[in-house]
């Protein structure tokens, strides 16, 4: 099936910016985390610890903005349309992609050639995106257990003792970072499985022509040859 058009309404500029912040933060946190866990670059441990904490705060703050702003900022609920609703509805169950988990899994695993018509996000994408804030809160909590200024606070110290000590917390924190890296790899795959248009949109905010989708009848209604004059 031909690709749906990618309009800017699907990804408001505010969320393009938060996406960039997430990407930069995860890259920096992963690198500095590796250096802290395996100090293979002597002499920069202090810089890495400070940078790690700074970008951890940035990541958490960015996540809070993304979640708390979703009921207020509008975006298109499906690709191929400029019609907008409050962005939170793109993450909630939609008629456009309800009961499509199995078809989407088959498509991503190459057992199904044509991808299902759906909302802006496929069902696996929605589940992954809902998991990310939970992972951020979890890894931030374990980070505060490890951070010297907060590690002795009652809640963090209690959890550290509960799981068996600081070494266990450090391992949990480290493995959760790998969870983020795996998610990032899957996120890239899910984003480009239908073509490179999503990358052009999210990185350059560049619209891409294609099939036009009507969210009321949940079907393709035409074409927009946007590429011919982009």
Image (cartoon, rainbow, N blue to C red):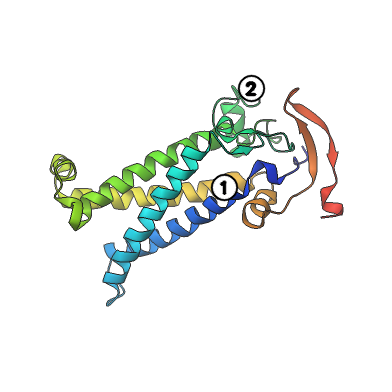
Labels 2, 1: front one: 1
Q: Residues within 10 Å of mark 2 (few under 14, many from 20)?
A: few
Side (left or right) of 146 relative to 131: left
Q: Residues within 10 Å of mark 1 (few under 14, many from 20)?
A: some
Q: Quadrant of the N terminus?
A: top right
From the image, tell me which residue sits under label 2. Answer: 95
From the image, tell me which residue sits under label 1. Answer: 15
Residue 27 drawn at (x, y percent): 44, 60
* Residue at the bottom extreme of this rendering: 43
Side (left or right) of 225 relative to 27: right
Residue 101 drawn at (x, y percent): 56, 27
Q: Quadrant of the C terminus?
A: bottom right
In the image, 98 versus 155, the foreground residue is: 155
In the image, 147 versus 3, the foreground residue is: 147
Give the mark, 2 or 1, whose residue is nearer the N terminus: 1
Q: Quadrant of residue 206?
A: bottom right
Q: Are marks 2 and 1 in contact (CB under 8 Å)?
A: no
């Amino acid at each position: 099936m031909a690709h749906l058009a990618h309009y800017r309404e699907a990804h408001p500029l505010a969320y393009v910016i938060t996406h960039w912040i997430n990407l930069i933060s995860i890259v920096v946190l992963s690198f500095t985390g590796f250096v802290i866990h395996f100090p293979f670059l002597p002499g920069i441990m202090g810089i890495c610890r400070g940078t790690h904490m700074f970008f951890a705060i940035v990541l958490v703050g960015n996540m809070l903005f993304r979640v708390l702003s979703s009921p207020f900022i509008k975006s298109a609920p499906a690709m191929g349309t400029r019609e907008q609703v409050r962005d939170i509805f793109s993450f909630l169950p939609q008629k456009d992609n309800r009961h499509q988990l199995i078809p989407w899994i088959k498509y991503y695993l190459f057992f199904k050639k044509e991808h299902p018509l759906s909302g802006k996000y496929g069902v696996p994408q929605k589940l992954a995106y809902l998991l990310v804030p939970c992972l951020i809160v979890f890894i931030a909590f374990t980070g505060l257990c490890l951070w010297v200024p907060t590690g002795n606070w009652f809640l963090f110290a209690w959890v550290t003792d509960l799981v068996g000590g600081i070494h266990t917390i450090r391992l949990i924190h480290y493995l959760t970072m790998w969870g983020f890296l795996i998610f990032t790899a899957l996120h890239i795959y899910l984003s480009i499985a239908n073509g490179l248009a999503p990358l052009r949109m999210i990185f350059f905010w560049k619209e891409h022509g294609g099939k036009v989708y009507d969210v009321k009848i949940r079907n393709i209604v035409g074409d927009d040859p946007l590429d011919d004059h982009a």
